[in-house]
Image (tube, helix red, strand yellow):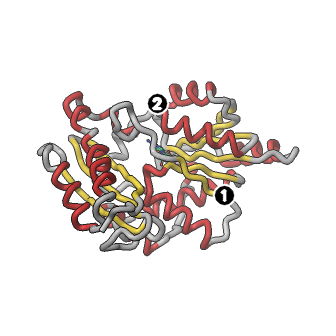
Amino acid sequence: MKIYETKQAIREEIARLRKDGSRIGLVPTMGYLHDGHLKLVRLAKEHADHVVVTIFVNPLQFGRNEDLDSYPRDAERDFTLLRQEGVTAVFCPTPEEMYAYGSDTIVDVPRLSGILQGQQRPGHFRGVATVVTKLFNITQPDIAIFGEKDYQQLAVIRRMVTDLDMPIEIIAHPTVREADGLAMSSRNVRLTPEERAIAPIINQALDQAQALARETSDIERLTKCIYTILRKEPRLQIRTVDISDAETLGSITHLTKPAVILITAGLGSVMLLDQRVIAPGKDAV
Ligand code: AMP
């Protein structure tokens, strides 16, 4: 596995790989890898001859009061894990390499970025869209894998790829969970043991809402059910609970087609994010 820190070096490597017609699969990450990331890598391998993983904690997508400085990092551990997965190349640039002095261009998907979790994190999805565009331009993959865990991010990227005619197939991987249901995340390492014990309540709330969707299509009732469960844990700071059209992320009052539940909640110093796609139940009224 080769490791590159400059755009030019990874470009040259990918040009070499492509010479025999090989397909390139890209898995963009912010590092501190867990089993969720590794499952994305395995999915990429099913669709491509060579997998390229990027590790870059993108300053552009962090707000002023967010955890850019304390975001967990361990490059050596990441390299070991990726080597075991048979990854061909890793691109891990510095912020200065990614954003040259005077850099000014941004990519914005304004409607999808401004709603739901975007209201809590102004500029976040613009930062994501910009860095993903740059990573696509640098690595020119045939396919790229993203996790459903960051459901709105996935929607923003799909929209951007369609709107800007990027010749890249976007493939989604379902959310990978710990045994107790907590969605895996690099940030989970910052939970105290007490917080870690509380955190699976988000998945439990999603389970309950999904079960209730078999009986009712009333979004208000489903939302209330989630709040009732989450409020049992006073240490959990509920930020957003939304149930939206799974495709457009537009607001809905009734479950008549697939919808996505998106939850954001603070726990200690960590922001937890989770999602679940639900479909209208046969018995729903
Ligand atoms: P991150 O390093 O958190 O930026 O994540 C890199 C990629 O891995 C993104 O496409 C995420 O959606 C995806 N990802 C992170 N955690 C999970 C998870 N628990 N299950 C599935 N995908 C995930």
Query: How many numbered marks appear?
Result: 2
Determine the secondary structure under disc 1: strand
Q: Is residue 154 visible from the viewing direction of this image? A: yes
Q: Is mark 1 within 8 Å of ligand 1?
A: no
Disc 2 versus disc 1: nearer the observer: 1
Task: Name the residue tied to disc 1.
Answer: 169
Q: Which residue is mark 2?
A: 74
| Circle 2 Cα neighbour tier, 10 Å, few/some/many (<14 / 14–19 / ≥20) | few
Q: Quadrant of the N terminus?
A: top right
- The residue lying at 73 percent from left, 48 percent from top is 11
Residue 245, quarter of the rendered image:
bottom left
SS label for mark 2: loop
Would you identify the image quadrant in which residue 161 lies? bottom right
Amino acid type, mark 2: Asp
Q: Which mark is residue 60?
A: none
Q: Amino acid at mark 1?
A: Glu
Residue sitting at 43 percent across and 75 percent down?
111
Q: Are marks 2 and 1 in contact (CB under 8 Å)?
A: no
Q: Residue furthest front?
A: 283
Q: Quadrant of the C terminus?
A: bottom left
Residue pictured at 56% horizontal, 47% vertical:
28
The answer to which of marks 2 and 1 sits earlier in the sequence is 2
- Does residue 113 appear in this view? no
Q: Position of residue 249 (x, y in %)?
A: 41, 68
Q: Nearer the viewer, residue 32 or 251?
A: 251
**Whether residue 33 is situated above or below residue 265 in the rendered picture:** above
The percent position of residue 117, horizontal first and vertical second, equals 34, 61
Q: How far, Cα to Cα, is label 2 from label 1?
A: 30 Å
